[in-house]
Amino acid sequence: MKLSTDRRYSDPEKAARKLLDIANAIAPVDGTIYIEKINAPMLYQERATAAEYKARLDLAISRGWLLLHDGTYVKFTPAGAELFA
Protein backbone atom coordinates (compact mmCIF):
# COMPACT_ATOMS: atom_id res chain seq x y z
CA MET A 1 0.00 0.00 0.00
CA LYS A 2 1.40 3.37 -1.01
CA LEU A 3 0.31 6.47 0.84
CA SER A 4 -0.52 9.48 -1.30
CA THR A 5 1.87 11.64 0.71
CA ASP A 6 4.85 10.89 2.87
CA ARG A 7 4.32 11.04 6.61
CA ARG A 8 6.05 14.00 8.21
CA TYR A 9 7.83 11.83 10.75
CA SER A 10 8.45 8.72 8.70
CA ASP A 11 12.19 9.27 9.24
CA PRO A 12 12.84 7.80 12.72
CA GLU A 13 15.86 10.00 13.45
CA LYS A 14 14.01 13.22 12.58
CA ALA A 15 10.99 12.21 14.64
CA ALA A 16 13.06 11.20 17.66
CA ARG A 17 14.84 14.55 17.59
CA LYS A 18 11.49 16.37 17.35
CA LEU A 19 10.34 14.42 20.39
CA LEU A 20 13.51 15.55 22.21
CA ASP A 21 12.86 19.15 21.14
CA ILE A 22 9.38 18.96 22.66
CA ALA A 23 10.75 17.43 25.87
CA ASN A 24 13.48 20.07 26.06
CA ALA A 25 10.90 22.87 25.84
CA ILE A 26 9.07 21.56 28.91
CA ALA A 27 10.13 22.76 32.34
CA PRO A 28 11.02 19.63 34.33
CA VAL A 29 9.58 18.99 37.78
CA ASP A 30 12.37 17.68 40.01
CA GLY A 31 14.32 16.74 36.88
CA THR A 32 11.45 14.74 35.39
CA ILE A 33 9.12 15.41 32.49
CA TYR A 34 5.71 13.79 32.69
CA ILE A 35 5.06 11.68 29.62
CA GLU A 36 1.71 13.30 28.86
CA LYS A 37 3.52 16.61 28.36
CA ILE A 38 5.28 14.97 25.41
CA ASN A 39 2.35 12.82 24.22
CA ALA A 40 -0.09 15.62 23.49
CA PRO A 41 2.17 17.83 21.36
CA MET A 42 3.56 14.89 19.42
CA LEU A 43 0.17 13.30 18.76
CA TYR A 44 -2.07 16.33 18.32
CA GLN A 45 0.10 19.23 17.20
CA GLU A 46 2.64 17.25 15.17
CA ARG A 47 0.01 14.73 13.99
CA ALA A 48 2.16 11.64 14.60
CA THR A 49 0.30 8.37 14.86
CA ALA A 50 0.43 6.45 18.12
CA ALA A 51 2.66 3.81 16.52
CA GLU A 52 5.04 6.50 15.19
CA TYR A 53 5.14 8.19 18.58
CA LYS A 54 5.88 4.94 20.44
CA ALA A 55 8.56 3.90 17.96
CA ARG A 56 10.26 7.29 18.25
CA LEU A 57 10.12 7.26 22.03
CA ASP A 58 11.65 3.78 21.99
CA LEU A 59 14.36 5.02 19.61
CA ALA A 60 15.23 7.95 21.90
CA ILE A 61 15.44 5.53 24.84
CA SER A 62 17.53 2.98 22.91
CA ARG A 63 19.94 5.72 21.79
CA GLY A 64 20.42 6.65 25.44
CA TRP A 65 18.90 10.12 25.15
CA LEU A 66 15.97 9.56 27.54
CA LEU A 67 15.19 7.32 30.49
CA LEU A 68 11.59 6.15 30.92
CA HIS A 69 10.47 5.61 34.51
CA ASP A 70 7.41 3.45 35.18
CA GLY A 71 5.76 4.73 31.99
CA THR A 72 4.84 8.00 33.73
CA TYR A 73 7.81 10.27 33.18
CA VAL A 74 11.10 10.64 31.35
CA LYS A 75 14.45 12.14 32.23
CA PHE A 76 17.18 13.34 29.94
CA THR A 77 20.38 11.34 30.16
CA PRO A 78 23.69 13.19 29.97
CA ALA A 79 23.90 12.17 26.29
CA GLY A 80 20.40 13.56 25.65
CA ALA A 81 21.13 16.81 27.47
CA GLU A 82 24.35 17.15 25.48
CA LEU A 83 22.29 17.44 22.28
CA PHE A 84 21.01 20.80 23.51
CA ALA A 85 24.25 22.15 25.02
Image (spheres, helix red, strand yellow):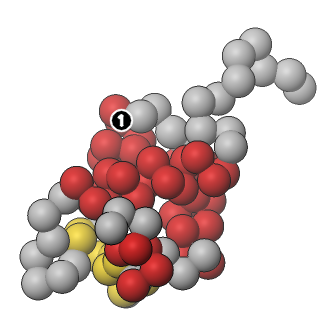
- Location of residue 43 (image quadrant): top left
* 64 over 5 or under it: above or below: below
Instruction: Name the outermost residue toward the top.
Output: 4
Q: Does residue 45 appear in this view? A: yes
Q: Position of residue 41 (x, y in %)?
A: 31, 43
Quadrant location of the N terminus in the rendered image: top right
Instruction: Name the outermost residue toward the front.
Output: 85
Q: Residue at x 70, y 24 (%)?
A: 6
Q: Position of residue 35 (x, y in %)?
A: 31, 66
- Location of residue 33 (image quadrant): bottom left
The residue type indicated by label 1 comes to Tyr
Q: Residue at x 60, y 75 (%)?
A: 63
Residue 85 appears left or right of 15: left
Quadrant location of the C terminus in the rendered image: bottom left
Instruction: Name the outermost residue toward the right.
Output: 1
Q: Position of residue 15 (x, y in %)?
A: 55, 48
Q: Residue at x 78, y 20 (%)?
A: 3
* 47 over 32 or under it: above or below: above
The residue under label 1 is: 44
Instruction: Give the camera-side residue of 2 and 25.
Output: 25
Q: Does residue 58 appear in this view? A: no
Residue 42 appears left or right of 54: left
- Disc 1 secondary structure class: helix
* Badge 1: residue crowd in 10 Å (few <14, some 14–19, many ≥20): few
How many marks can you see? 1
Q: Position of residue 47 (x, y in %)?
A: 46, 32
Residue 38 appears left or right of 64: left
Instruction: Give the camera-side residue of 1 and 64.
Output: 64
* 80 over 50 or under it: above or below: below
Q: Residue at x 41, y 34 (%)?
A: 46
